[in-house]
Image (cartoon, rainbow, N blue to C red):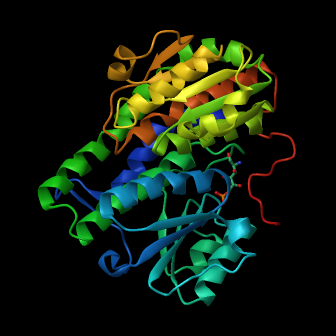
């Protein structure tokens, strides 16, 4: 049920603090201060992780790659399932295959998973639908516990998937001797803060609505970020495309000079995602480069980032400060809300965008 909301997507964006809380409760022991991944996976013995997924689930996997490699020093390969299934990937049984899927029924992801099984890999699925085909076929199911997602544009499933992979990164880091008990407790405390901070970042909705008026007039929109924010840039662009039908591209900000900067003029809104983290200076300098070419920047950052922001951004949006462990979770709501409000302004069918299905069970 939509309750007081106009659309399922709007409701599902607002459901995220609670959804994330449910997810975290399943993967965190708050008393012991430990991450716990059910199932018999020996993270210390793994050579690598192979993630396969499509769409937003793929982007959640990309965020996971940043976190898992950084915290656990465990190599993560990630590939779009529709490509992976038709090539001849070099797979070894020492890897764990993880399928990311809200529905658990996406045909390409399922086929990629079966390919991994055939090569002797242990398989896991991070899914919302626990009765799904993927959940039935894998060795280990890691449910995301965010409740049913109805809107075609995935929102709460994304943050729930990222939450699971964040817990996995912490659990793998412990298993591989990369963090001690005190550090694990510290990381767990940070993760437990995520629902409250997501709620705060949803509080940017009025500011986002105001920006949406300009974005709705644009023909093309660019999203830029570095590190995990480069994945969020892809997600922001995907959301905008699918529900508002505005052409949008997400780029790793460092790639700008290698092509996309040629698109920048005074008619191109550019959404820059940059919390005050180790990537900040670099992202800020990319932001200055696009502003020097007339680009209209919407800067989504945090209080410290806003303080150091280069002059000239059209709008600065200040999300709450957060540790880099959870900033992908905290920075998601503003880009989801932006896509939502632009689509509403354009009169688009938000929950049932044209040409799209919630679950893509044919290739
Ligand atoms: O059910 P899945 O997570 O496997 O679906 C994958 C994609 O089809 C899905 O994420 C799609 O990209 C969404 N419409 C994005 O909002």
Q: Name which quarter of the figure residue 270 lies in.
A: top right
Image: 132 above or below 154: below
Residue beneath the point at 77% across and 60% down: 360
Left or right? Give the position of 75 relative to 170. right
| Residue 76 locus on image (x, y percent) | 47, 66
The mark tally for this picture is 0
Image quarter where the C terminus lies is bottom right
Residue beneath the point at 39% across and 29% down: 281
Q: Residue furthest left?
A: 182
Observer-nearest residue: 336 or 233?
233
Image: 21 above or below 41: above
Q: Name which quarter of the figure residue 101 lies in.
A: bottom right
| Residue 16 locus on image (x, y percent) | 49, 39
Observer-nearest residue: 165 or 200?
165
Left or right? Give the position of 50 relative to 113. left
Residue beneath the point at 34% across and 75% down: 43
Residue beneath the point at 61% across and 57% down: 102
Note whether residue 202 is visible: no
Note whether residue 108 is visible: yes
Left or right? Give the position of 312 relative to 250. left
Observer-nearest residue: 179 or 19?
179
Q: Residue furthest right?
A: 355
| Residue 267 locus on image (x, y percent) | 74, 15
| Residue 307 locus on image (x, y percent) | 34, 14
Image quarter where the N terminus lies is top right
């Amino acid at each position: 049920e939509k309750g007081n909301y106009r659309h399922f997507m709007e409701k599902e964006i607002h459901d995220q603090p609670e959804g994330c809380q449910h997810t975290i409760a399943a993967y965190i022991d708050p008393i012991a201060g430990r991450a716990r991944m059910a199932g018999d996976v020996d993270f210390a013995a793994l050579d690598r992780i192979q993630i396969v997924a499509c769409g937003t689930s793929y982007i959640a996997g990309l965020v996971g790659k940043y976190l898992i490699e950084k915290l656990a020093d465990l190599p993560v390969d990630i590939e779009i399932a529709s490509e992976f299934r038709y090539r001849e990937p070099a797979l070894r049984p020492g890897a764990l295959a993880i399928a990311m899927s809200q529905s658990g029924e996406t045909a390409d992801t399922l086929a990629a998973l079966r390919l991994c099984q055939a090569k002797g890999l242990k398989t896991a699925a991070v899914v919302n639908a626990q009765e799904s085909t993927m959940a039935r076929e894998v060795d280990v199911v890691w449910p995301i516990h965010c409740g049913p997602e109805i809107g075609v544009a995935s929102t709460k499933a994304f943050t729930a998937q990222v939450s699971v992979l964040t817990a996995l990164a912490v659990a793998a880091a412990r298993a591989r001797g990369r963090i001690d008990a005190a550090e694990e407790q510290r990381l767990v405390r940070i993760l437990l803060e995520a629902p409250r901070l997501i709620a705060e970042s949803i509080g940017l909705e009025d500011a986002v609505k105001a920006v949406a008026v300009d974005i709705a007039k644009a023909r093309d929109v660019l999203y830029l970020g570095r590190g995990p924010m480069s994945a969020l840039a892809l997600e922001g662009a995907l959301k905008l495309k699918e529900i508002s039908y505005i052409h949008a591209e997400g780029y790793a900000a460092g790639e700008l000079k290698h092509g996309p900067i040629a698109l920048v003029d005074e008619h191109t809104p550019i959404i820059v995602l940059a919390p005050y983290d180790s990537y900040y200076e670099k992202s800020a300098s990319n932001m200055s480069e696009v502003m020097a070419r007339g680009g209209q920047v919407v800067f989504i950052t945090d209080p410290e980032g806003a303080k150091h922001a280069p002059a000239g951004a059209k709008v600065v949006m200040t999300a709450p400060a957060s540790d880099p462990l959870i900033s992908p979770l905290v920075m998601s709501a503003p880009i989801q809300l932006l896509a939502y409000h632009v689509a509403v302004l354009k009169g688009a069918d938000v929950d049932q965008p044209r040409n799209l299905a919630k679950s893509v069970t044919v290739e």
